[in-house]
Amino acid sequence: MKKLYCFDFDGTLTYKDTMFLYLKFYNASKFRIQFIKHIPLFTLLKLNLLDAEKVKKSFISSILKGQSKAKIEKKTQEFFDQYYPEIFRENALDFIKNIDYSQTDCYIVSASLDIWVKPFAEKFKMNLIATKAEFKNEVFTGNFVGKNCNGPEKVNRIKEEISGKKFDKAIAFGDTSGDQQMLDWANEGQFKFFH
């Protein structure tokens, strides 16, 4: 029986959101300054008066824009070395260890940037569907390639990735409203399964 597993990353496999963790790790002093500057935007976002994608892009860009791909990759590896496996839910790690990859295609489907989720996906031998960082001449532009990978976009991107493949069952794992469409789309939607 051929199965498809789609895992949300932040909060589902991990205990905490990795965006703030990574950006703070990347440059703590810049993070503090930009966090304070972004408080009004975060507040408007909480009140649903601003688009999440815009705020996210603005905040990530304020710390990483103009950074070289080489430096970002180096910092990402350091981030991985420091936070794996401690930020992961033990139940999730146990579950992943027991996956039969000969019968299962696994994807991490994350709104987080591919930049910092990639080494974790590689560690788990999973494919990665995430919000894509845009690089020009090996430098991060501060923009995304395509849309923020959240909500309906998660389903669009999964369908794109698995186009032409046949599965007997698709099982999705998530923990927030941003995963709802993916959970509804799958044959089986598991909400907060590893909590």
Image (spheres, rainbow, N blue to C red):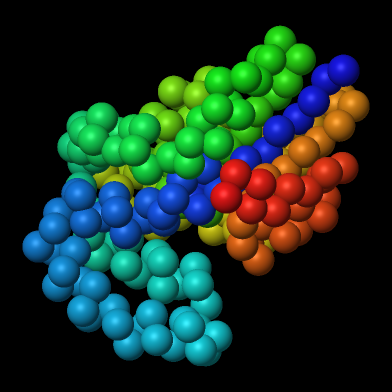
189 shown above or below 81? below
89 shown above or below 175? above
| Of the pair 41 and 104, the residue shown nearer to us | 104
Task: Tell me: 194 left or right of 26.
Answer: right
Q: Is residue 151 visible?
A: yes
98 shown above or below 67? above
In the displayed orientation, state which residue is furthest to the top: 102
Task: Tell me: 156 left or right of 16.
Answer: right
Residue drawn where x is 77% and y is 38% of the image: 171
Residue drawn where x is 41% and y is 56% of the image: 17
In the image, residue 120 lies at what x, y percent? 42, 32
Q: Is residue 126 visible?
A: no
| Of the pair 67 and 20, the residue shown nearer to us | 20
In the displayed orientation, state which residue is furthest to the left: 29
| Of the pair 72 and 16, the residue shown nearer to us | 16
In the image, residue 176 lies at what x, y percent? 61, 62
Residue drawn where x is 21% and y is 56% of the image: 24
In the image, residue 53 lies at what x, y percent? 49, 68
Task: Tell me: 190 left or right of 149.
Answer: right
